[in-house]
Image (cartoon, rainbow, N blue to C red):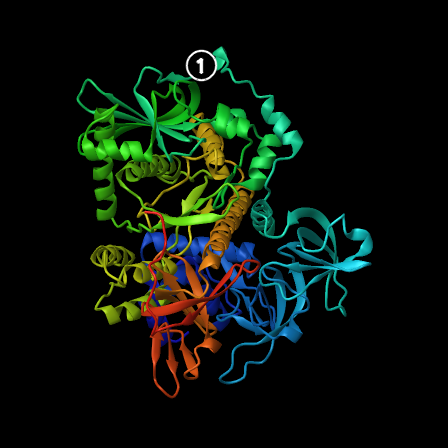
Amino acid sequence: MSNKKNKKRAKQSATYDKKNLKKVILSMMYEDQARSFNYKQISSNLGIKDADSRQLVTICLEELHENGYVDKQGMGKYRLKTRGGYAVGIFDLQSKGYAYVRSEEVDTPVYIASRNMMHALSGDKVKVHLFARRKGHDLEGEIVEVIERAKTQFVGTVELTKNYAFLVPSGKATFDIFIPGDALNGVLTGQKAIAEITEWPSNAKNPVGRIIEVLGDKGDHNTEMHAILAEYELPWKFPSKVEHAAEKIPDEIPQSEIKNRRDFRGTTTFTIDPADAKDFDDALSLKKLDNGNWEVGVHIADVSFYVRPGTILDEEAYSRATSVYLVDRVVPMLPEKLSNGVCSLRPNEDKLCFSAVFEMDENGDVLGEWFGRTLINSDRRFSYEEAQEIIESGQGELASEVLTLNGLAVKLRERRFKEGAIAFDRVEIKFEIDEKGKPISVYFKESKDAHKLIEEFMLLANKKVAETIGKVKGKQPAKTFVYRIHDRPDIEKLENFNNFIHKFGLGIQLVTPRAIAASMNNLLTNIKGKKEQNIVEMLAIRAMAKAAYSTRNIGHYGLAFEHYTHFTSPIRRYPDVMVHRLLERYLDGGRSVDSVKYEEMCRHSSDMETRAANAERSSVKYKQVEFMQDHVGEVYKGVISGVTEFGLFVELENKIEGMIPMREIGDDFYIFDENNYLIRGRHTNRIFQLGDEVMIKIWRTNLERKQLDFLLAEKEEPRPVRRKN
């Protein structure tokens, strides 16, 4: 291997994230395919010296082995698994009909022409035959095998004829599903339904399927929300046998259980939640100790007491993995008897909890900690607005306790940012909806001190629980645990981001992960209130990795925590239930659990979290388009929020986003410059760049595709955007 390549890799090593580190490791192995490597040799070749990064190399090698990219040779050595001219990856269909296969085995996405797709669908795991690379062209290939289907069920609108029908899928599917006459299941033309693909003959243009559920009439509010859930294969109701199992759970707490728990019913305790919340996961307690310090209790609903492993309730909770928050409703992970009843920490009721209790001084330093099963009785249920009023006025019920906890939270937050946490505070868009589900106004949800108070104590509990299990003494092996991990940012994305913000006279340091975080916080502070704030924050978030669940701890970059987990929301997140069970097991001296099994459970939970987030965004987008239907032809001011080869995305003042199609920018032929987030006119040299202000006219809306299209309207006066204050 050349010294030049070694030096280049060593220079980049400080900022490797897991995704790019895997690519670099594979690239190194490609250069010497007959050789076996251990983590020390790879670390040395890449100039990696710090313990955290060397641990990341070990994790990458294990995952490459599990995913079939390298062979394990014994004694911790790994060797490239050669496949000749083939690669395995994930099929990603594009809106224009071609696709890419993204694989860790090759350093660039593989282009797949429509004629070479072999009926592969987005998200499928496929085997691709790689063509010889032509100079100046993308790597190209042909699908030779669909290894694993991402989905076989599709939601869409039915077009019915006399003897058969087609289901036209929602989303970017490029095919319709043929439904024979005997597989219609009573569906009517124009209705939304779910179809399952039963076969796809190799010589057929369309797959064959059957209707498995009729959702209702197209355009009906409930039908459309259920269709969004179905599109992401998320349930909208519980099976009757699950509901029956929940109803059998007694409301009364057994006396035998009360005796086994630490009793906090005499300690001042309260909850702070959204005004419309019904499932209260967490409560805080506060008591002044004789030594002058504070005892702060973080009390979490003891879901694992009621939901036992191997039961039908547990199987359903694991399958769902998370509650889903659509624009107008919550689809809970647990039946209402549990989520809003026996588990919910309602005021003036005895409740079972799993608690993290801390002794803290006036500076917010943790001097002692205890974890275990408890019994509480909440004295008061606060909404965020009520708690915020106490913080701002200094007066109100339990004001002393709220103000004390807020003061400690402020100190915890200050310390967290000083140690390298990144301060992302994004505004959330919400809709006021009438009784028929129609959006009548838009408003924004911002994080205030009351939200931050709760956030800091939840972060503290999550961090300390993870440290209790993850920090091991000496050479004792760590026990298998569920961590919430967040990888280092992608250095290439950060470099592109840095180049872009230079146009505003801004910049970040890219030398080390700690320098990136510190300079990013300075940047986010300096742009507050400026017109480029939203764009810069959005691009900064895009440059970051996505958080996930794993048994392989690489720390949480965004929070600057070496150990972090999710312990505080078991009513709405299954990983928290897993953490409660593991924490109890290990506190009782139990042996470590099977890491392979738990890693698969973590992967499933991460996948379901992504689905739920996509469904939530889809429901918001649907309401955005529906809200703007009454404003077609009106002119507004906006900011370019995205630049692609097929158009400009523009965000209005009310955070609603639409697109100006490239073909509708008619004064020139525009060339897309991906690295600089702009398009440039070939003849006029006119530039449209991310962050530029533009005037737009609402052109057309398409609820079925959740599309909002704009036109440029530079010479017309803008209308104020109607929204609720």
Against 91, residue 130 (above or below) is: below
From the viewer's perspective, tell me whether residue 573 is left or right of residue 183: left
Residue 76 visible here = no
Q: Pinpoint residue 490: horizontal percent, then vertical percent.
A: 38, 62
Q: Pinpoint residue 404: horizontal percent, then vertical percent.
A: 21, 29
Q: Pinpoint residue 87: horizontal percent, then vertical percent.
A: 59, 68
Q: Nearer the viewer, residue 669 or 713?
A: 713
From the viewer's perspective, tell me whether residue 185 is left or right of residue 638: right
Residue highlighted by disc 1: 258
Indicate the amino acid at tag 1. Answer: Ile
Against 247, residue 151 (above or below) is: below
Q: Pinpoint residue 80: horizontal percent, then vertical percent.
A: 54, 65
- SS label for mark 1: helix
From the viewer's perspective, tell me whether residue 78 is left or right of residue 50: right
> Which quarter of the image is occupied by the N terminus?
bottom left
Q: Nearer the viewer, residue 139 or 620?
A: 620
Place residue 643 in its image quadrant: bottom left
| Residue appearing at x 26%, y 50% in the figure | 420
Against 552, residue 715 (above or below) is: below
Against 84, residue 680 (above or below) is: below
Place residue 66 in its image quadrant: bottom right
